[in-house]
Amino acid sequence: MTDLVLINPWRENMTINNENYQVDSMESKRPLAEKLQAAKDQIGENDKIVKQCLEQLREWIRQNEDIENLFIDDNYLLRFLRTKKFSLFMTQQMILKYLNFRKKFFHYIDSLDFEEEKANALINTGFIFASPIRDNEGRRVIIYNVGKFDMDRFINVDMARALAITYEAVIEDEETQILGVNHVANLEGISIAYTSLFTITEFARAITWGEQSFPMRHKDINLLNVPSAVKYVYEYALSRMSKKLTERFTLHDSITTITERVDKRCLPLEFGGVMPMSEMIQLWKEELGRKRERILGLKNMNLLSDRGIISRKTINEHMTNSNLEGVTGSFRKLEVD
């Protein structure tokens, strides 16, 4: 059924010729367009709101002395606006937190070049990549094979960079900004030794700050083969997340339950899908090649001071302050998604 499979938005004329996962790109555009419109309605997006928000957001960036070299093109700013459902105040806070996250973790993500030796090697293992086919809700599917991370060959910096490269690349597509992401992770083969990759403080900050600062709509998170030895890490990670995000986690004991929840045509053959993982990885690397220069340009962004960041404890007070609402030009109150 072609309405369940959505071809690569970055290669609209591409047709996959294998009979097991053949997709007609023209037919697949129709359901994608319908899902996009429904999602736009859900986040309150229309041409008038987009125009007004972009104008006011750019003016705020121009006047903000703490922000340096931030991209201000429509595509880049819309990823933040869409994540925050076009609340200007919340979008501004996310931008500041995103820049602060990059600053605080600069030693991990200073070079997001997939062609760098370690990054390229890690991608080739299948540790992380994005499927070329969207799920039945139109969401981009990110595949993780955590057990492929060889601790004798790679270090925590390699892991952080591979994750950051993937997230920055998938969020470049406007379809993904609107429809969100489905994470599918196989944890088979990991051990308690993996917990030594990051300190508990780094781990906690990465989870909390990552959720609050990165402009991605995490719509579904599927974990397969979680070892009992590291379930306490999983439980700790959940404790650092919002209730909304924790409700989107599903644990699976077998590939069978994964394919019951996630359409198998967007999964690699090794996950019960159809297309071999090696082919998916090759397509993913071609996509990364097209986006490489854009992602490398992120390095020049900077936040000179975090004085504009408002703590989560007091943010609702600011959201209901009529004076602040007028200054920021927000069109609606905070809606969490």
Image (cartoon, helix red, strand yellow):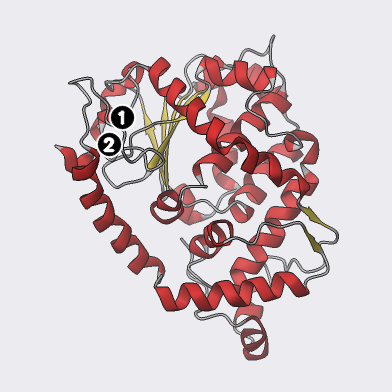
Residue 132: name its quadrant: top left
Taking the spot 61% from the left edge, 20% from the top edge, the residue there is 120
Quarter of the view holding residue 273: top left
Residue 9 in view = yes
Task: Provide residue 327's location: percent of width, then percent of height.
Answer: 67, 85
The answer to whether residue 111 is left or right of residue 287 is: right
Q: Residue at x 46, y 60 (%)?
A: 337
Residue bearing the label numbered 1: 258
The percent position of residue 181, horizontal first and vertical second, equals 43, 44
Q: What is the residue that sits farthest to the top in this orientation?
A: 152
**Mark 2 residue element:** helix
Circle number at residue 261: 2
Q: Mark 1: which amino acid?
A: Ile
- The one of 195 and 57 positioned closer to us in this rendering: 57
| Quadrant hosting residue 8 | top left
**Quarter of the image that includes the N terminus:** top left
Query: Front-most of 136 and 117?
Result: 117
Q: Is residue 231 above or below residue 135?
A: above
- Of residue 163 and residue 310, the one placed in the foreground of this image is 163
Q: Are marks 2 and 1 in contact (CB under 8 Å)?
A: yes
Q: Residues within 10 Å of mark 2 (few under 14, many from 20)?
A: some
Q: Is residue 89 above or below residue 137?
A: below
Question: In this rendering, would 317 be left or right of 78?
Answer: right
- Residue 101 image offset from top left, x and y in percent: 72, 49
Q: Is residue 316 in view?
A: no
> Badge 1, how many Cα within 10 Å: few under 14, some, many 20+?
many
